[in-house]
Image (spheres, rainbow, N blue to C red):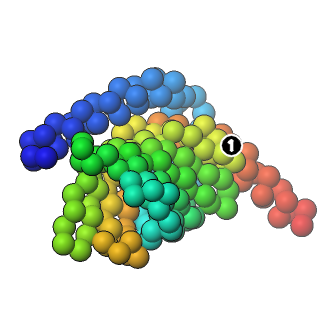
């Protein structure tokens, strides 16, 4: 596949993710609708999630499952599972992921172009947070940059998501933090 074809596929993926993000952004609560404490993610919070993963298993030659740890804003530290479905004819990978923290989960998806070097596989594309549970119930994001660099052996990998939230589930997180505070006071 030529570089121009890969660029066109990546551009199409970016446009698709932007179209998907528009309804989510329009449904986001107004920042003026409530005063939010500084430590609780708000609409428009910066998303910077970085982590280290490794190949856990291959469901098939084209479906790879990675697990590892992540940390960053606004969700904190936790574990991550990513399932990559490779589309060799298109030179893209479709990825679904779940981040699990002590206070809830965050789920999402990504589409990326991938290329293979002598000892690495690199992924570069776009992603989106599509949901969450617990403190992050209802979490969503706009288009996130997604990058990953994998060793060919699958033992050393780094991942990164960058962008902004459109609805981080702040109300649920605030309720959870109040419950934790009350439990600690009673405790």
Image position, residue 63 (x, y; %)? 43, 54
Image position, residue 50 (x, y; %)? 41, 63
> Image point 38% across, 62% down: which residue?
159
Image position, residue 148 (x, y; %)? 33, 61
**Res 44 seen here:** no
Q: Give the camera-side residue of 12 and 88.
A: 88
157 with respect to 132 (left or right): left
Quadrant position of the C terminus in the picture = bottom right
Q: Give the camera-side residue of 55 and 30.
A: 55
Q: Give the camera-side residue of 35 and 176.
A: 176
Q: Residue furthest front?
A: 60
Instruction: Please say if 21 is above or below 126.
Output: above
> Image point 30% across, 65% down: which residue?
149
> Image point 31% across, 46% down: which residue?
87
**Res 159 seen here:** yes
Q: Give the camera-side residue of 181 and 79.
A: 79
Image position, residue 28 (x, y; %)? 51, 29
* Residue with the mark numbered 1: 172
112 with respect to 187 (left or right): left
> Image point 29% across, 56% down: which residue?
123
Crowd rating for badge 1 (residues with CA inside 10 Å; few <14, some 14–19, many 20+)? some
135 with respect to 158 (left or right): right
Instruction: Please say if 85 is above or below 35.
Output: below
Instruction: Please say if 40 is above or below 183.
Output: above
């Amino acid at each position: 596949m030529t570089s121009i074809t890969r660029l066109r596929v990546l551009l199409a993926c970016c446009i698709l993710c932007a179209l998907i993000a528009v309804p989510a952004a329009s449904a986001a609560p107004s920042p003026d609708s409530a005063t939010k404490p500084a430590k609780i993610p708000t609409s428009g919070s910066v998303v910077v999630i970085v982590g280290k993963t490794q190949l856990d298993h291959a469901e098939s030659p084209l479906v790879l499952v990675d697990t590892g740890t992540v940390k960053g804003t606004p969700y904190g530290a936790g574990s991550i599972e990513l399932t990559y479905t490779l589309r060799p004819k298109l030179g893209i990978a479709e990825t679904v992921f779940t981040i699990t923290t002590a206070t809830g989960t965050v789920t999402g998806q990504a589409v990326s172009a991938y290329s293979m070097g002598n000892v690495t596989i690199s992924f570069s594309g776009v992603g989106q947070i599509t949901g969450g549970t617990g403190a992050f119930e209802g979490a969503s994001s706009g288009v996130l940059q997604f990058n990953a660099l994998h060793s060919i052996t699958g033992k050393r990998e780094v991942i990164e998501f960058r962008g902004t939230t459109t609805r981080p589930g702040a109300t649920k997180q605030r309720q959870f933090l109040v419950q934790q505070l009350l439990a600690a006071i009673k405790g």
